[in-house]
Amino acid sequence: MTTEHNVLGRSLPRVDALDKVTGRATYAADVYLPDMLMCKVLTSPRSHARIVSMDTSKAEQVPGVRAVITGNDFPDRYFGSGAVRDRRIMARDEVFYIGEPVAAVAADDEVTAQEALELVEVEYEDLETIVDPLEAIREGSTLVHPDMPNFEGYGFAMGGNNCTLLDADRGDVDQAFRDANQVFEETYHSQAINQGFLEPMACAANVEANGRLTVWASTQGPYQVRAQLASVLDIPLSSIKVNAMELGGGFGAKLRLAFEAFPALLAMKTGRPVKLINTREEVFTLNGPRLATTIHLKTGVTSDGQITAREAHSVFDVGAYLGAGPNAGVGHALGAYDIPNFRLRSYGVYTNKIYVGSYRASGVADMHFAVESHMDSIAHQIGLDPLEFRLKNVVKEGDANVSGASVPANGLLETIEAVKEKMSLPRKSEEGRGIGISLGEWRSGSGPSTASISVNEDGTVSLLTGSVDISGSDTSLAQIAAETLGVELDQVIVAKRDTDMAPFTGPSGGSRIVYSQGKAVQMAAEDARDRLVGLAAERFGVPSEALSCEGGRVYVQDNPPQSLTLSQLAAASLTSRSGPIIGMAALSSMPYAPVFNTQAAEVIVDKATGQVRVTRFVQAQDVGVAINPMGVEGQLEGGAVQGIGRALSEEMQIDPETGRVRNPSLSTYLMPLAIDMPAIENILVGVPSADGPFGARAVAEPPGFGPPAAIANAIYDAVGIRIKELPLSADRVLAALQGQDGDEYHIDVEALKKAETG
Amino acid sequence: MKRHLNLTVNSEPRQILVEPYYSLLDMLRDELHLTGTKKGCDEGDCGACTVLLNGVPVTSCLVLAHSAHDAEVTTVEGLATREGLHPVQQAFAEYGGLQCGFCTPGLIMSAVGLLEKNFDPTEEEVRYAIGGNLCRCTGYTKVVQAIMAAAEQARP
């Protein structure tokens, strides 16, 4: 066998490119069924209130209205998107935030449904509201959920409004601070942001003749939707089929059950198909975004710039429900550094506002902004070059990571060197211009993964997996299959899947598809290849080891003309002893494989207006092996631009009194446009992972981490001001340039420590 | 009440019964089932619904269907011919100018609109031409490369 790759490592067009450039790709909103009804959702106008009464009779009388549902139409059940079952799918007798669903209508068209909504009469009795997470975490604060201790899944936390607490400890932190030459303390704050996917969530549901429910969903996790839908409707999981439609961006927002239950229950009530399409306003108000995070960091440093200890206390606003698992940021409080002593705490806090969701490494991006700004700040204060200070402390192969696991071989140092060279660092820019850097770390995502591969009689192969393509992963998976089986990419058919047909797999999130699902595909392809080779060995009367599978055929290594094509073998397999060729694989988890990157931003700061413009953005990432370099670059570029948006302009403005989202539109929530962005420059570093398919590592999360810190550090380099709150908007930069102190967020660390020790 | 509307869609003359309040976007999607044109915001902010109206890119969510009476509308479905893809479509596929694909039809229509009046755009002109098209996946770098490459190919 040659070691040269044929399909792997080539920038081939995506397998779905043709469907997408011609407009034929079908998203959930594109599902049109005969007699289909349209659904609209009524939401709470109150921050926290008891529902005294509800009357839907007037709405039901509107011509064209076929059904109206309220919370009372659902089984009396709680479910959880994260660890804690704290939430009903539709409010029953109490609402906890403005925007919480209270009723839904199915009508002949959207206009009629909307008209009916306005006729649903709800009487509320207001209750006390708490919106500020830093206030909510204080002892004696108004409680969002007084019955929290009784929620299923509620574990160790401080009580009050604190619903989760993550911790990590090592060494003697207090002694290490006493031994340090200098100790630095800073507080950083990152804003609430929306995932900004272009496809508003949509869902269609229909009850089939056999009584089973079919759902067409816009989701990253069809099996997760199926399980949660079964739970809230209290029907067997096996009575639901979820069709995962083409996904118009998710970035974590579409990992779990959203509101698929509304059209589903309405379809069950009416016996007709029902479709719900979110408006853009609902994208901002119905579905969990990321909420604000405040992070206090304390770091001890020796006189030669060695970090001895770190303490981190971070407060994550989770809104009304823990919509996205425990806040993932805690471990990342160390950043890409080897720190011998640490005490890390991360608190999730309930408030009366829209529940938190996932977004491209939830919590980690917030933590990286704090850590990488803090590193820069310390470097300047101790008189070291920011890059040099980082290099003194970076984690190396063999060091223990935050959970004690040994860090395997990786390309962190290569990414630093690559960016240093490309940006000619260190260098001093002219006044008003600056360069900032940021290091990032993530781990390749794991989780249950399966694949099956059939070889067709014409020599093509059909690949079936349950994973949703969110990032070009179908193309990467097809390339892995093609490479393993020695066929061209266009010989691989990637099946469109549903939960009846495809085997279970974890959701497409956390950068796990290529690393974990890709591994399953590689193993399934190897299985199929072994069967092809075995069959050929039987026919040729030679041992399997004497054969190779390449170029669409299996041949005898010593006599290549003696060969059978895949087509001949697949045809022969139908009547062979072992039957048709099918390869299968399943795995539950993959070993720890870190991903590191280095990002650098060059900015111009307009001192008159505070406007910051990114003029260059360079990033290097250890991708292990790039299965499809063009696809990998696309992930890096898109991630970086999302990070630049988070850095400069994006902010969900939330009313401090009521928790209402004030800017639920794309003209007020400002995402980057082509005219604002530089061309992103990428360097792919390749230190293969030990276990990933062909050595690949995860790609998609890390590029979004660094831009906020890199840009904040560049602003410091340009004009000498340190901004610790996101976004780095013109008004905030201008205020800082005018000498206004931006430090407006304070965590009472002593009180938190006291609460912990009792 | 629905009223008659005459227009040409992708070179085909159509007579359609449409509600007076329907946008061109809703008419294309709900009445003609030309679902390649996407609804990302319905407020003219995202550009996913861009079509050519008498050759000029417009956000079809902001155009009333009946105001397109007698007009010529081109959607993403109308670009490819029997001979193959439009050069802009081809370039988007080849240069990786698409990921999730939801903004892609709108971006492609904006690019086609640009190249119909400017064969030789600068990178800045390309970025301005797609300045009304939000894309969350690509970061625009490869989208711009694709349009520049398509321009080069389309130049006489």
Image (cartoon, grey):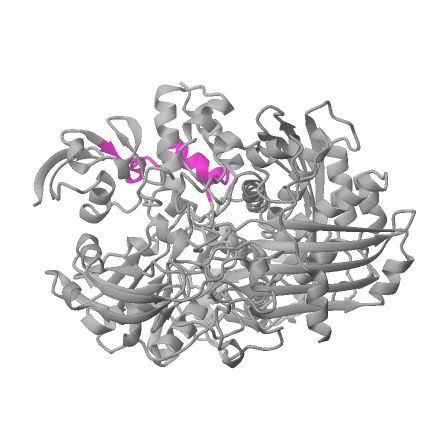
Which part of the image, by quadrant, shows the N terminus of chain A? bottom right
Q: Which residue is located at x 37 percent, y 58 percent?
A: A99
Percent x, y for residue B7?
A: 15, 33
Percent x, y for residue A104?
A: 26, 64
**Does the rendering let one see residue A103?**
yes
Q: Left or right: where does residue A561 sit relative to residue A207?
A: right
Q: Is residue A86 magenta?
A: no
Q: Left or right: where does residue A364 sit relative to residue B70?
A: right
In the rendered image, which quarter is residue A405 located in?
bottom right
Q: Is residue A636 above or below residue A610?
A: below
In the rendered image, which quarter is residue A720 located in?
top right
The span picked out in magenta is B73-98
Relative to the observer, which residue lies in front, A391 or A330? Answer: A330
Relative to the observer, which residue lies in front, B48 or A724? Answer: A724
Q: Which residue is located at x 29 percent, y 53 percent?
A: A30
Percent x, y for residue A394?
A: 80, 51
Percent x, y for residue A312?
A: 72, 59
**Does the rendering let one see residue A1?**
no
